[in-house]
Image (tube, rainbow, N blue to C red):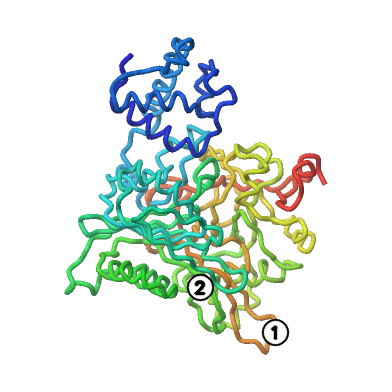
Amino acid sequence: MEINKDDLTSLIEGLSLSAHTKTECPMQERCTELDPDHFEEFKHEHLDTILKHYEETNELRVPCFLRAQYDTIIKQIKVLVESSQNENACGTSTKSVAEKLEAAWPYNFFLSSTISNKLAKNEILSISLVEILDKSLGEIETSAQINFCIDEVWLMDHYRTAGVSDSPILLIHGDPEYESTTFPNITAVYVKPEGIGLNHSKIMLLGYKDGSMRVIISTANLIQIDWGNNTQGIWISPKLHKIRDDKVLGTDSPTNFQTDFIHYLSHYQIKELDYWIKRLKHSDCSAINVCLVYSVPGPRNVDDMSFGHLRLADLLSQHVKNVNEADTVIAQSPSVGMFGPTKNDWAGKEFLTSASASIEQLINDPSQMHTPLPKFNFVYPTCKNVKESYDGFEDVRMYTMCKYSMYRKQKWIQDILCQWKAEKRHRSRCMPHIKTYCRVAGSAFAKEPEGLRWFLLTSANMSKNAWGSLPLNPRRTHFQIGSYELGVLFLPKFIFGTDLIPLSDSKEGPAFPMPYDLPLVRYGRSDKMFFTDLPTNQLENGF
């Protein structure tokens, strides 16, 4: 039996990565399955070993103790190879990563590649971590990963598959249980804000051998489950070319991305980031068309509009216009904080007021304080959504947080809840770890919404800790934020020079690739939120 070299390489890479995301077949070496779906679900170490030996020696050798199953093993290997060939011939998987990025312009917004759904995996706006590291985007000479949770061994497997495992890597993380290994090319720095704050941003900085670099901002931790069957959001910058020392001025974008990103990174006060700040200063960021919205831990004066939801409000009040009170602001996150006991508290008043800001409705104009706010909805999976997902209750519990004990204090949110539905992106069964916020022009329940006033992809969950909160006591003057957070804000002004981002292909440009379906689908009468502090049997049987 002969295997095409390209097919074998693709297959070996897939086996290497799936080893961390699939469970071993219960039958192990005794397995006789020939169904491709079985191999999608389970790994088979004896087959992996045979194929890797074939790659190294060009000899298909079946160990002596398996000779009785020789015919079955050969048939299983054929199934694996044919599945790999079909996958590479299916949809857009034949596109290089550079071609994918070109097709994603002007948004450069991807969802994570999934394991269990081939349609989601193969769509052109789906991307994996190995693809992000792919040499077609640039030959990596050094990189930095700023994140909350990082699994070094898992991460290095991806670097190794991409062929860059020897390059220097800076890890800035916020995981108190982080296990450092002995990789000589890794420098790890732990960041822990005071109190319950987290280093929650998810950033990749990739430095290429030609002197250019790229910035990736996402919602995914660098651990196995975050890149498996859930839904993550990833923004990838254009290639930022190196500029001469005497040409530094005039290289920022109209969105001030370079200035704001350096401002954000400087707040870490970590000497290992000085190299990247200098590299950013000498990179041409003029083609970037998104703004940055970020949070930095600590108390701020209430008139400081640089961070948290006040930062969002400041940008919207400068660049968004022609809004309508019939619009809908949608928040979507996998973890739910304290919204407040009534709709006139933090979420429904303070946060929504910031998210409703516009040129016509300045956030710092006292005369606008009583202007009607737009409709407000929150997208979060129901128990049924989670039960029918690829991951199920126990795995989703690992990347979601919503406590019934907290919900009992804010039951008004039941009126604004909408299900996780993503049929158009083939991800209804891929539970969200993505966090997004947007303003839909008109009703989000209309059959064909007009468009988006803005869209935000961010690491920030819907919580005071992430977004900040104004003082309830008038004698206090501080706006308090708990965590480091970072996101990219898509504004039509900077992308198309218009007031709306289209939701269907138009003369202005391509449709924005929403991660979930519009129109929204409200919770039904019997639908319950997925509560992570309730036992599985209670979630399954109702409560």
Q: Nearer the viewer, residue 500 or 36?
A: 36
Q: Mark 1 and mark 2: span between their CA atoms?
A: 22 Å
Q: Quadrant of residue 61?
A: top left
- Circle 2 crowding by C-alpha within 10 Å: few under 14, some 14–19, many from 20: many
Q: Position of residue 242 (x, y in %)?
A: 22, 63
Q: In the image, is 524 to the left or to the right of 295?
A: right
The residue at which mark 1 appears reads as 473
As drawn, 49 above or below 528: above
Q: Position of residue 436 (x, y in %)?
A: 54, 56
Q: Nearer the viewer, residue 372 or 221?
A: 221
The residue at which mark 2 appears reads as 296
**Residue farthest to the bottom, as pictured:** 475
Of pointers 1 and 2, the one earlier in the residue sequence? 2
Q: Circle 1 — which element? A: loop
For residue 238, say whether it is visible. yes
Q: In the image, is 452 to the left or to the right of 133?
A: right
Residue at 69% across, 65% down: 339
Q: Quadrant of the N terminus?
A: top left
As drawn, 6 above or below 72: below
For residue 321, say whether it is visible. no
Q: Nearer the viewer, residue 44 or 215?
A: 44
Residue at 30% across, 50% down: 166
